[in-house]
Image (spheres, rainbow, N blue to C red):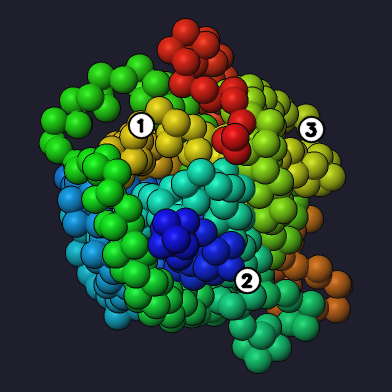
Amino acid sequence: MTEKLHKKLNDSAAMRWGALFVVAFTMMAAYFVNDVMAPLKSMFESNLGWSSSEYGFFTGAYSFLNVFLLMLIWGGFILDKFGIRFTGILSTVLMVAGTAIEYLGITVLASAEGVFLDYQTSVWVASAGYAIFGVGAEVAGITVTKVIAKWFKGKEMATAMGVQVALARIGSQAAYALALPLAGGSAEAEGGCPCLTTESVVAAGSTDLSFPLMIGLSLLVLGMIAFLVFAVFDKRLDKQNEGVAEESGDEEKFSFKDVASILGNKGFWLIALLCVLFYSCVFPFQKFATEFFTLKYNMDASLAGTIAGLPALGALVLTPLFGGVVDKRGKAASIMMLGSAMLIFVHMVYAIPTISATWVAVALMLVLGVAFSLVPSAMWPSVAKIFPAHQLGTAYALIFFIQNIGLWGIPVLIGKVLDSFCKVEITDPAQLQALNGCVCPSECADCADKCLVAVSSYDYTLPMMIFTGLAVSALVIAFILKRVDKSKGYGLELPNIK
């Protein structure tokens, strides 16, 4: 009788995995919006007249409010005080509102005059919207992480987190692969040379930069509805958990005193530092990767965008697989070390100017995809081993806050470095054709005007060296974390399923 009474909603595999897929769709939409502008850097310059510094400022704006107004930390407090449902709905509303403002910045206000602190009006408005979206997306991230910790406690937690990450990466891969086709028009429709590709039209400024973002906004609205559906089932689970907690007497509530306890934990700082260093080698790099591939490896922009999204595609399969290994075998700290070491190799080879074969670029992105799957599958479940459930929301929020310092600062730094130290002049006609996405036969009269149009070009050697240095630092922190785990007994090397 007691066993029957205590059977809860999340004891059903169908219910807990169904809940996971519902909230994962919300994050999938968030990841699509987060990445859909990344392959369009050249269009920001050609269509809106932005510089690399302005693009870097816009990209870094995602984390601006989270870092400087501590919005992620407040989001963690709200999550632990008011729960998953309230916080999740709030975060989805912020994502929708922020994306709408970003859309306004690159459409209605695209040609607005005025410069403030060296940045155009459109840059400021689009960045403000992206910053609001960033608050919602990051708070949604910690909320979904706590959802999994709650619904999969004592079950396939690492596998579930891996599946959620993998599904979210579908949004990223779709963004990188579809951004240019969604934004591009027909060259023939524009009256141009039939040899021009979509990328040529991009260079000529005859594309719709806003359309991919509008698709993302529509997905976010659907994601908000999906989370509302999940909230109904989560409320039922809470009612069941209340009865169990009352019988056992072990229910604990969050207190602001817990913040001091979290900050005083050495494991917290090591996980947080590893998180910021590791993700600073991945997400900011992907924001510039499409242009990097077109410049160094002479790829057309659509192919470069697809390759830039390969880590997300790899994560789709590998993150759940590695999560299953962590659940059954453990070795989370060792896995984090391995993933960090792989990042060093990737960025170090990218930094070598003489290695410019296309297959090398593709192979390195596949290796990065493996690393991108290894570390998250081990890192996020490890937090649940270090902290009790009533501190998890705040612990994740503080870690995400520190992560966002890198997600803000590194794109801004890379944009400044490109403008200040890495500009190069392209004069070779064949290279200009490749950069503008053209195959230009001799009979094409418009070739000189459209295929050989001047473009901004950069030498990415120095940025790649910066990413390599960050990856080395991540490996050092992962090594220290493994040593501390051994002395503190967090159990990071032990399996999750007992």
Q: Please identify the quadrant where the C terminus is shown.
A: top right
Circle 1 sits on which residue? 387
- Of 20 and 34, the residue lying toward us: 20
Q: Residues within 10 Å of mark 2 (few under 14, many from 20)?
A: some
Q: Secondary structure at mark 1?
A: loop
Q: Please identify the quadrant where the N terminus is shown.
A: bottom left
The reply to whether discs 1 and 2 touch (Cβ–Cβ < 8 Å) is: no
Q: Identify the residue at image location x=69%, y=60%.
A: 306
Q: Position of residue 296 (x, y in %)?
A: 70, 43
Circle 2 sits on which residue? 178
Report whether 259 appears left or right of 384: left
Q: Quadrant of residue 356?
A: top right
The reply to whether discs 3 and 2 touch (Cβ–Cβ < 8 Å) is: no
- Of 4 and 361, the residue lying toward us: 4
Q: Identify the residue at image location x=61%, y=31%.
A: 495
Q: Real-space Cα distance between discs 1 and 2? A: 40 Å
Q: Position of residue 35 (x, y in %)?
A: 51, 59
Q: Secondary structure at mark 2?
A: helix
Q: Residues within 10 Å of mark 3 (few under 14, many from 20)?
A: few
- Of 225 and 447, the residue lying toward us: 225
Q: Secondary structure at mark 3?
A: loop
Residue 355, numbered label: 3
